[in-house]
Image (cartoon, rainbow, N blue to C red):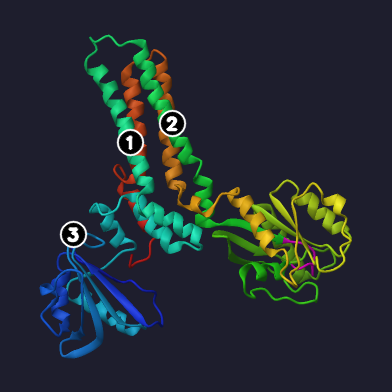
Amino acid sequence: MEDTIAAIMTPVGIGSISVIRMSGKTCLEIADRIFRGHKGKPSEYATHTLHHGGIHEGDLLIDEVMLAVMRAPHSYTTEDVVEISAHGGIVSAKLILDLLVMHGARLAQAGEFTRRAFLNGRLDLTQAEAVLDIIEAQTEGAHTAAVAQLQGHLYRRLTKLYEHLANTLAHVEAHIDFPEEDIKPETRQQLAKHLKDASDFQQKLLSTARDGRVLREGVRTIIVGKPNVGKSSLLNALLGHDRAIVSPEPGTTRDTIEEIVNINGLPLRMIDTAGLRNDASDVEMEGIKRARQHLQASELILLVLDCSKRLEEMDRELLATCREKPMIIVLNKKDLRQIIDADYLRDFTTCSISLKTGDGLDQLKKLISIHLWQGRTRESYREIFINSRHQEALQHSRKALEKAEAALRGTQPFEMVAADLREALNALGLITGSTVTEDVLDRIFSTFCIGK
């Protein structure tokens, strides 16, 4: 990491400010060549100071900027860092970036600033992944969980587990190195219990994988029902703004509409579908076909029924189709006289609402939260929620631990126990980054944006 990298940190487009970041041994030297401030040069500035001046190409002023200096090791990458805040827009930031490259910097790769922070020991790999989770968080729940991981909650637990297993391995290797020492049967059982405790702890972490996926990706939720029962109105109500067209004319929605809906801090990937009926036009039938496809892949179904009417054949067909999936029946139009067949629905989870008045909407949100979060409080967002990469590594580690435990409880030699323990430790190292390979790092950081 001898070279200096540079990138535009802010999204490309029209905005009030554009920020260009530069990190590396020569970034202050490069800044000296192009920045003219009121006092001194960037290489003379104290760390964590902000300076007003201009970016120049020779005698030509490119832009009037604010330049920040952060000296090693007290920066995001632990290297010397310069950040230039220029006027927003496409041209100014691009000209400044080109100028930095002209004077010796190179364009940063995706996630390279955070990768340097990891390689330089500023962050462990779980914290580096948390940076991306914060950027991509779509609800406050996802954001809270990501910040907790950035603070090292998961890393500290894994480090404690790693040290526990490493101490156990040391005991096992001691018995290998000194075979003349008789080992009592209860000692093998004590070591096996240590591994059982570690395996149980790993299972607790693994149990958070589903909640982690919910927070990061959302739950695929589909709104289904006949035409004109209020599906699009429900999507708009949950979003808090008009996204879908609402019309008394049947068949207005002819395709699926997908949006992220925030339900008490939890993300739902909400899909509004075409109303299901048998006498639809060709175009509408294509929308109905897509609706049925989404129905099969959904994780939660909101089946909207008109409670001011009796159940019809299509309603009963939908109930039968969706019965085996997680479902909440939304009984819309509670402001009207209710004549729906209540006895037929008594075995289902139902919620009566009026999308015209908004009555019952909060109760529906509560029911959805209970389904997703099983009644836990928002404080639980700070619990450990592992991602799919962590899950895979933990499963590998736990399987190795189970083999080591079985070997200890049996009569197998300690060499086999030690081999399994090393495999378990190596898998844990993949999570924190202590044993990670370059190709794994490439996969992780390639998902970052260029300036992060």
Q: At which x and y percent is residue 17? A: 34, 80
**In this rendering, does residue 431 appear at all?**
yes
- Which quadrant holds residue 132? bottom left
Q: Residues within 10 Å of mark 2 (few under 14, many from 20)?
A: many
In the displayed structure image, the side of residue 41 where residue 266 appears, left or right: right
Q: Which residue is label 1 attached to?
A: 162
> Could you say whether the residue bearing mark 1 is in a helix, strand or loop?
helix
Q: Check the image and report above or below for 284 versus 39.
A: above
CB atoms of marks 1 and 2 within 8 Å: no
> Could you say whether the residue bearing mark 2 is in a helix, strand or loop?
helix
For the residue pair 165 and 258, the one nearer the viewer reads as: 165
Q: CA distance from mark 1 to mark 3?
A: 28 Å
Q: Which residue is label 3 attached to?
A: 73
**In this rendering, does residue 426 appear at all?**
no
Q: At which x and y percent is residue 69? A: 19, 71
Q: Which residue is label 2 attached to?
A: 199
What secondary structure characterizes most of the magenta part? loop
Which residue sits at x=79%, y=55%?
318
Amino acid beneath label 2: Ser
CB atoms of marks 1 and 3 within 8 Å: no
Q: At which x and y percent is residue 31? A: 17, 76
Q: Residues within 10 Å of mark 1 (few under 14, many from 20)?
A: some
- Which quadrant holds residue 233? bottom right
Q: CA distance from mark 1 to mark 2?
A: 12 Å
Amino acid beneath label 1: Tyr
Q: Quadrant of the C terminus?
A: bottom left
N-terminal of the two: label 1 or label 2? 1
N-terminal of the two: label 3 or label 2? 3
Q: CA distance from mark 3 to mark 2?
A: 38 Å
